[in-house]
Image (cartoon, rainbow, N blue to C red):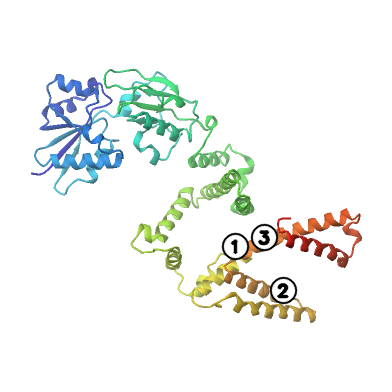
């Protein structure tokens, strides 16, 4: 027999809200199965002497909602093998078990969703006067909250808050973007009686006496100026306002070229926060970097070139493509295998047919030491490299001698100095170190030693301006010796 399941929506609990079509379907059902008996319509079914069974027993077997929904779907399709099933839920459009039914439907199965009153319509009609907003509303079952992106710009209805634990989880999720003192509208349980909605602070959402699947909460849209926390969409909206017709004169004048230096500055300030180990500072600086990304996207949009959606689309497409071992069929077990596969995919993606083109593709916008490191590493991928740093070190001496020869001949040593720096990067790379980082540390060490030297000179009643380089060198060596004997000094 071909299995057929018809899904009907019961609404929040008042039998008076059933549509005529739904009521007729309940009466005519061959096998009527309620998701749960804890619903106001259950008593009406008894009064109408309409037989039914429920899935309540499965709630005790499964704590994970995804597993519960899958188990309900499996049992329903099995039951439908004997006779058509009418499956009754609060709202078929948001119910997780209905989604599981559709996902697990057998080839010969048939799933019919009957139109009915949605929870959004039922709850919004019960809101106090003046609370309903004209803009669209988002409806989310409570168990799906943590895997859903919040957007405070839209009114929000969260349904099926069936336990204090779930209410607590929902509250924590909401207070990530909403003020915990914000007034929300709670729809109490309607299993035994049709209780009216009540208004309370968000912080009290998990402090109610009764919870079941008919409990819901409504949050109105919150304007930007009244927000304490914000999401990515808010940043995009703020830039739209600032760069709009009546926006900020400075913001409206910016171009990709004028913003270039700020992107570099913010990136380096972010690196500085990482080096400091200050997590709060890091979060702040990452926000500044994100601002630059959205700002450039806004400039692109104003010229009809690209939008922030193009930016996110490009990076998401790139991450999915280059992680073929996660989203595709490639097999990578180690980080080294992932890196090798990444380079292969990147080369194919950009149409780089020679290794020379791979080297030339390394961005010229990188700091010189970093670019040299990356170019050398890509050359090493095809075997153009020394085996060890010790083997590469003579090249440094060779380049240093060539610099000396240029200086001795009173010629410009610029080119040879560049070769010397390039060879130093090579030795550094083969030591497994980063030249940019080492030079940064060396500069900091120089500043520290210079400061200590100057303090030593001042304590001797002298000044830098009154000493020769040879005399300064005496104090420098004292500081250097002291720091080597006591590295923390």
Name the residue rendered at 90%, 62% in the picture.
Answer: 467
Q: Quadrant of the C terminus?
A: bottom right
Q: Quadrant of the N terminus?
A: top left
The answer to whether residue 378 is above or below residue 230 is below
Percent x, y for residue 408? 79, 81
Q: Secondary structure at mark 1?
A: loop
Residue 315 - label? none
For marks 3 and 1, give the one nearer the viewer: 3
Residue 414 - label? 2
165 horizontally vs 436: left or right: left
Mark 3 crowd level (few <14, some 14–19, many ≥20, 10 Å Cα) = few
The alpha-carbon separation of the residues under discs 2 and 1 comes to 20 Å
Percent x, y for residue 449? 77, 59
- Disc 3 target residue: 440
Name the image quarter holding residue 389: bottom right
- Disc 1 target residue: 366
Q: Secondary structure at mark 3?
A: helix
Task: Please say whether residue 137 is visible from this viewpoint.
Answer: no
Percent x, y for residue 13? 26, 23
The answer to whether residue 429 is above or below residue 229 is below
State which tag comes first along the sequence, 2 or 1.
1
The alpha-carbon separation of the residues under discs 3 and 1 comes to 16 Å
């Amino acid at each position: 027999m071909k299995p057929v399941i018809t899904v009907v929506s019961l609404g929040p609990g008042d039998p008076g809200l059933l549509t005529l079509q739904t009521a007729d379907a309940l009466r005519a059902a061959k096998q009527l199965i309620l998701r749960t008996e804890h619903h106001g319509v259950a008593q009406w079914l008894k009064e109408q002497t309409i037989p039914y069974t429920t899935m309540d027993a499965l709630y005790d077997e499964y704590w994970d909602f995804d597993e519960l929904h899958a188990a309900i779907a499996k049992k329903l399709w099995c039951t439908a093998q004997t006779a058509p099933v009418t499956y009754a839920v609060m709202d078929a459009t948001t119910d997780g078990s209905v989604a599981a039914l559709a996902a697990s439907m057998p080839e010969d199965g048939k799933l019919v969703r009957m139109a009915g009153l949605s929870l959004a319509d039922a709850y919004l009609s019960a809101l106090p006067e003046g609370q309903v907003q004209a803009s669209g509303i988002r409806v989310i079952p409570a168990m799906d909250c943590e895997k859903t992106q919040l957007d405070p710009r839209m009114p929000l209805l969260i349904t099926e808050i069936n336990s204090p634990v779930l209410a607590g989880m929902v509250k924590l999720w909401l207070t990530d973007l909403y003020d915990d003192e914000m007034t929300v509208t709670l729809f109490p349980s309607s299993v035994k009686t049709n209780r009216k909605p009540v208004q309370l602070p968000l912080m009290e959402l998990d402090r109610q006496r009764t919870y079941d699947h008919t409990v819901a909460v409504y949050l109105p849209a919150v304007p930007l100026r009244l927000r304490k926390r914000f999401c990515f969409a808010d940043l995009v909206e703020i830039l739209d306002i600032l760069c709009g017709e009546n926006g900020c004169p400075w913001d409206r004048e910016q171009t990709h070229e004028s913003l270039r230096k700020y992107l570099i500055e913010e990136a380096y300030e972010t690196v500085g926060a990482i080096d400091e180990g200050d997590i709060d500072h890091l979060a702040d600086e990452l926000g500044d970097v994100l601002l630059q990304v959205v700002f450039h996207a806004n400039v692109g949009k104003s010229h009809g070139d690209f939008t922030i959606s193009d930016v996110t689309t490009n990076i998401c497409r790139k991450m999915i493509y280059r992680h073929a071992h996660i989203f595709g069929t490639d097999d990578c077990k180690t980080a080294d295998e992932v890196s090798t596969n990444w380079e292969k995919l990147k080369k194919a993606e950009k149409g780089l047919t020679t290794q020379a083109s791979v080297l030339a593709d390394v961005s010229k916008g990188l700091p010189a030491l970093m670019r040299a490191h990356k170019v050398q590493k890509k050359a090493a991928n095809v075997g153009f490299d020394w085996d060890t740093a010790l083997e590469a070190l003579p090249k440094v001496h060779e380049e240093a001698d060539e610099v000396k020869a240029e200086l001795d001949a009173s010629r410009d040593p610029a080119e040879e100095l560049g070769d010397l720096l390039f060879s130093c990067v090579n030795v550094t790379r083969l030591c497994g170190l980063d030249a940019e980082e080492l030079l940064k540390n060396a500069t900091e060490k120089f500043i520290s030693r210079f400061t200590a030297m100057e303090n030593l000179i001042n304590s001797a009643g002298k000044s830098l301006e009154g000493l020769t380089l040879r005399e300064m060198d005496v104090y420098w060596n004292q500081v250097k010796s002291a720091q080597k004997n006591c590295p923390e000094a």
